[in-house]
Image: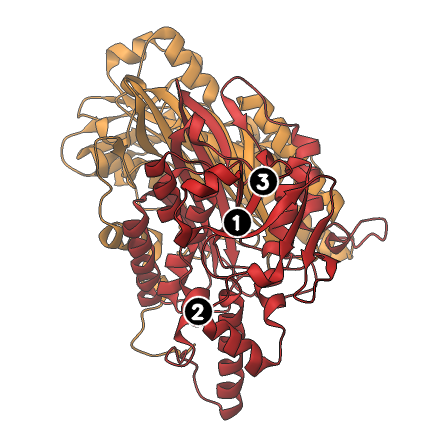
Chain colours: A red, B orange
């Protein structure tokens, strides 16, 4: 393949540039039955009457999204399902069917693949998903590509684009823990490698944040609770890249700005402890850490009033304009700089 | 990762062993709405009344399924769609929606990714598919994971398992061309590498077989023709691995044997020419070459009588017992030895 100097390296484009290229070349999907194309956590197409299906796909690549040295195979199987279920939950839908493409390098053994599928099964049981198909092939690096089809009433679907100025911005669960867990695991690995020992994660110290990293939980419980209460946010996304990045998606899609309060973020005690041990700012972990797979949503005061306060933490509000700002504990208002990570960006290892 | 000698290397398992492990651990999918799980070209689930959706996924990995030196990016994009559409056609269904996961190494340039999507678009236009979602990520090797959702009336779906003794065995199109094309391309590359020149396929010589390799055509036209004529075979599969392997799937699933006539295989003149130039047996190319993406089906004499003779070539019949045999031109009856290729098998490069 000639490395012609007239060609553009990928890093000049970034992941979102690629998605734009894809949209430009393929055209926005259209037709009566396709309700949402490549612009949200999942695509939406009509099945019959008020029923729709949603579909999402995520590819996890060894050395990019996970390090097998700190990610036991069973957890990898569970996580591959959970991150896709999270995208379905981010449409306010229920997951139904999954397919799994698995690219296997020669240094993966049969017993490890069985552990992987055990993890898949546990997550599928947890979320009510059936694996209906797949493909296995040789590959240079362990690669997991999961596609999940979900279902909802059309009237229950929530997009990224529905936020309006004045809406409250809310999150479920705790933030920054998954990234804190990753840092702990990488530190453990470094120490063991220096001693020349095989790595097995010591999950007893910092058990909570390690669990947040290895076995993230898709917040389908919240989606089901909203359905039971008959409430629905205006806009919804899951926190895969961190609020710093994902809140921007809601604001861009909705044509609004946002102001959030750093003090209002829900952060677990163990995440504070890890941040202190690492000498890191815990707010940065919570804003830009990524992989928490909690939900971020915009809802009216009235809707929030009908939600469960245990899984609805108000962290700010939607504003007019397009600025996305964070109110610091000292009262200062700063732009929420693009953080989290992009896979073609600054080379974050996670 | 400790290479514990108690662990089982993948090559002792093979691709079908892995599928069995997956079924054993995940359990056969069940439920009123899931009609077919991990046992056919695609899974089938009920949408409403007599309408079903089918879903299939295929992962193409550089160095395993394709060599970028002989596979221009646009063709790769078209082929990634076509091979999945072929699995949908092999259920006698119509493709509707696609998602594309793309793992990109650093030596892929933006312009090449655009060429890839141009190829995707052409194939999607050809088959009536809409790309509704995707995921792009960094990867060590170029990896393409496509999932396609298709649709049919439940009564139109055809499985691998419906063949009965006495059925005629038929194929569409011409066999062995795709593998002949691969051999020509690899030979061209070798010659150019010896001269130190960059490779660009010379498609003018052996244009037909090269096209069979680079731009396979899913036989959706045949599926539509059957629907228009109101006919339907008893059992159906697409020829991805070669008759030698794919006919066994029909026989195993249906509990029958087969006898086919080598002389009855439809082989293009250019495939004969390439086989002669390579000093290879043209029958072996047609039986074990793979990647032709024609359809192989079992149907009653009456059904065959209602099909278009241009796309229905009788090559043998289903028998009682379980033997899968091939009648040679000299009248000898030989077991059809397992051929084609398995990705974890004999190390075939295609």
Residue B6 place in picture, x, y as percent: 29, 77
Task: Give me the chain letter of mark 3.
Answer: A
Q: Earlier in the sequence, mark 3 or mark 2?
A: 2
Closest to the observer, A52 or A20? A52
| CA gap, disc 3 and disc 2 | 39 Å
Residue B316 place in picture, x, y as percent: 29, 25
Q: Residue at x 14, y 35 (%)?
A: B321
Task: Give me the chain letter of mark 2.
Answer: A
Q: Earlier in the sequence, mark 1 or mark 2?
A: 2
SS at circle 1 = strand
Q: Are marks 1 and 3 in contact (CB under 8 Å)?
A: no
Q: Respond whether the residues carrying marks 1 and 3 are from the same subunit.
A: yes
Q: Residues within 10 Å of mark 2 (few under 14, many from 20)?
A: many
Closest to the observer, A247 or B311? A247
Q: Are marks 1 and 2 in contact (CB under 8 Å)?
A: no
Closest to the observer, A196 or B306? A196
Between disc 1 and disc 2, the foreground one is 1
SS at circle 2 = loop
Q: What number of labels is visible?
A: 3
**Residue at image mark 2:** A71
| Residue A167: mark | 3
Q: Where, quadrant-wise, is the N terminus of chain B in this rendering?
A: bottom left
| Residue A170: mark | 1
Q: Is residue B20 above or below residue B55?
A: below
Residue A174 place in picture, x, y as percent: 47, 61
Q: Residue at x 32, y 37 (%)?
A: A228
Q: Respond whether the residues carrying marks 3 and 2 are from the same subunit.
A: yes
Q: Residues within 10 Å of mark 1 (few under 14, many from 20)?
A: many
Horizontal side of A322 relative to A98 (left or right) equals right
């Amino acid at each position: 393949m000639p490395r012609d100097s007239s060609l553009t390296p990928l890093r000049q484009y970034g992941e979102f540039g690629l998605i734009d290229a894809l949209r430009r070349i393929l055209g926005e999907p259209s037709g009566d039955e396709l309700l949402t194309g490549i612009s949200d956590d999942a695509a939406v197409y009509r099945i019959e009457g008020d029923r729709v299906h949603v579909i999402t796909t995520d590819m996890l690549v060894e050395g990019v999204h996970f390090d097998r040295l700190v990610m036991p195979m069973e957890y990898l199987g569970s996580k591959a399902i959970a991150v896709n279920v999270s995208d379905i939950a981010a449409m306010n839908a229920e997951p139904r069917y999954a397919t799994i493409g698995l690219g296997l390098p020669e240094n993966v053994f049969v017993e490890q693949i069985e552990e992987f599928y055990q993890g898949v099964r546990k997550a599928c049981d947890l979320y009510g998903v059936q694996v209906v198909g797949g493909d296995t092939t040789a590959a240079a690096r362990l690669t997991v590509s999961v596609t999940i089809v979900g279902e909802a009433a059309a009237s229950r679907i929530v997009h990224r684009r529905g936020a309006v100025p004045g809406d409250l911005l809310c999150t479920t669960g705790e933030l920054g823990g998954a990234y804190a867990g990753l840092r702990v695991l990488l530190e453990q690995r470094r120490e063991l490698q220096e001693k020349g020992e095989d790595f097995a994660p010591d999950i007893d110290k910092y058990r909570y944040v390690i669990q947040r990293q290895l076995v993230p939980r898709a917040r389908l419980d919240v989606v089901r609770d909203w359905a039971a209460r008959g409430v629905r946010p205006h806009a919804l996304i899951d926190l895969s890249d961190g609020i710093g990045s994902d809140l921007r998606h809601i604001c861009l899609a909705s044509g609004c700005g946002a102001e959030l309060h750093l003090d209002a973020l829900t952060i677990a005690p163990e995440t504070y402890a890890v941040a202190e041990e690492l000498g890191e700012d815990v707010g940065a972990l919570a804003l830009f850490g990524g992989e928490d797979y909690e939900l971020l949503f915009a809802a009216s005061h009235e809707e929030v009033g009908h939600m469960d306060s245990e899984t609805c933490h108000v962290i700010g509000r939607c504003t007019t304009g397009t600025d996305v700002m964070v109110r610091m504990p000292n009262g200062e208002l700063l732009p929420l700089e693009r953080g989290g990570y992009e896979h073609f960006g600054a080379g974050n290892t996670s």
